[in-house]
Image: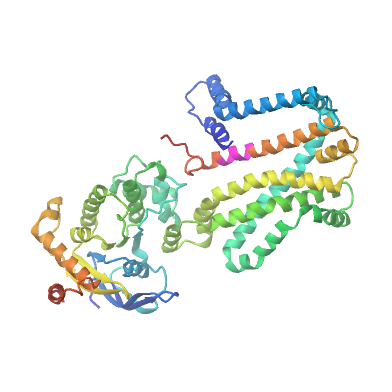
Amino acid sequence: MNPSSAFQLSDVSKVYTNGTVALKNLDLTVNEGQFVSLLGPSGCGKSTVLRMVAGLGKMSAGTIYWGGSSQRRLAYVFQEAALMPWATVQENVRLPLKLAGMSKAAADTAVAEAIALVELTGFEHSYPRELSGGMKMRVSIARALVTKPEVLLMDEPFGALDEMTRSRLNSDLLHLWQQKQWTVVFVTHNIYEAVYLSNRVVVMAARPGRVVADVAIAAPYPRTEEFRTTPLFNNYCREISGCLAHASGQLLLRPDAEAKAGDVINQIA
Amino acid sequence: MTNLFSDLANSANLEKSISPSSAWRQLWLRPLLSPDVLAPGAVGLLLLLFWEIGVRVTNMPPYLLPGPLLVFQTLVSEWGTLFPSMLITLKITLVAFIAAVVSGLLISILFTQSKWIERSFFPYAVILQTTPIVAIAPLIILWVRQAVPGESSTFVSLVICAWLVAFFPILSNTTLGLNSADHNLINLFQLYRASRWQTLRYLRLPSAMPYFLGGLRISGGLALIGAVVAEFVAGTGGTSSGIAYQILMSSFNLQIPRMFAALLMTTALGVAIFVALTVFSDLMLRNWHESAVKREN
């Protein structure tokens, strides 16, 4: 096993009790400090990969090897903010520490720090219902960061937000990632988001869930908003969109186009 | 009605900066002058007026239908006997209600800890609920008299009857609430390796709160109904007889105005219980739950 790998999924399959094959013979190695996006249509098992990595549910077959990190050092951000509506921002962020048995006084510094990281200082005593969608997501991220994780799993965290909030949170997340150097696995179905954030995009296809392409995004960090308008960015988006279309079989009726998309995949491989 | 009560609850937690006297005015006057009180109040007064006029115009004898004025006069003159009876019924209701809350809460927690316990016992809770209390009250009274002879026998059997009626809404509502915690939060608790107790304490119980409080409101009224029905069946005289016994005796003696007065007291008690529980529920949920949060549009 590669010494710098954070974790490695080997030959992982997941079949749900209703017979759905969510994942079939999936191999995936994520290196330490990498920002990997899992991109694909709904039903391709990208969320299932995260759940397996987090240990939420059993694999039907296969193994996960942990390298430099451990399952205990990970945090999870869900698609919905999933906050406790009866608790304030501060109490929501403190939750993981409270579950670990840390006293309120000992947790306070870490909680304040996490809230400051997501720029919500001043909202400690607000209730979730008083916050906008973007702010709720920030609280959710602060709750993930409060344990100082090494691996951050994010399951379409910005999927339900408007475009402006999404791009703002994208750049804030990127900024934090550069500071903290976590390993991030980011599930999304938004190509632009995936290319903008990641240094590696894993394209998946459905029925059964599998990896169809693995694209390295060789653009330097820090990436600014201008990166979104560069030819390099557009090339990556086009390439990945070709892989997606090919995998979902949309181009089957046009053999010439399929051949082109096939070339792209061959180049990657 | 609910609006009125949440008004009460909300004015109870107004800003503390205003002076005490104006705070009191805010607390009582404002809700009383709101349309939520004025409108039903006006309807009630009109109905009473028509009733009184109708009784006087048709020369209706009081033993068939007494006018509201006469009922009110009787209530005042009979207060000395009716009020202690009401207190006895209130005591039965309260003890049964508290027993229902405690047992309902504990059993619903037990149900959610194991699917097998819930599967095995929930149908029997339903059977307990659907058996008519009037039918089994004589049995309960008979059994309790065997087990607890003496003065407190009637009291205990009446409490058991009222408890049987009040218990189920709390059990079924709280069970539903404990099972309806956000699945993402359940995953989060799993991820951070929360113990069973932590999940219950920090996630399931708070999630169940609105459901539990809803059950509380239903069950408060039912405890009173259970107590009254059981008193009807028990029908015992003696020193400690509740308000239902007074209704029963008044009807036997054709003291219809007195019967109406006792009925009025029972209804007022039921409304008071409902108001108290609604205000309590709104206070508990005022920070977070949609049902208790005031929104400006």
Q: Which quadrant of the view contains residue B37?
A: top right
Give coordinates of residue B152: x percent, y percent. Answer: 85, 47
Whether the magenta-drawn stretch holds residue A141 is answered as no
Q: How many marks are shown on the rendered structure?
A: 0
Q: In this view, does B19 lie to the left or right of B61?
A: left
Relative to residue B101, is residue A1 depicted above or below?
below
The residue at the point 83 percent across, 45 percent down is: B232
Q: A194 and A101: which one is in front?
A: A194
Which contiguous range is marked in magenta? B275-281
Q: Is residue A45 visible?
A: yes
- Residue farthest toward the front in the current orientation of the protein: B58
Relative to residue B242, is residue B49 depicted above or below?
above
Relative to residue A60, is residue B223 depicted above or below?
above
Give coordinates of residue A95: x percent, y percent. Answer: 42, 53
Give coordinates of residue A72: x percent, y percent. Answer: 37, 65
Name the colour scheme.
rainbow
Q: B248 and A106: which one is in front?
A: B248
Quarter of the figure with the C terminus of chain B: top left
Q: B111 and B202: which one is in front?
A: B111
The residue at the point 86 percent across, 31 percent down is: B63
Give coordinates of residue B137: x percent, y percent. Answer: 81, 53
Q: A49 and B229: which one is in front?
A: B229
Q: In this view, does B114 lie to the left or right of A40?
A: right
The residue at the point 19 percent across, 70 percent down is: A243
State the predominant SS element of the stretch in magenta: helix
Relative to residue A239, is residue B91 depicted above or below?
above
Quarter of the figure with the N terminus of chain B: top right
Q: Is residue A106 visible?
A: no
Q: Which quadrant of the view contains residue A59?
A: bottom left
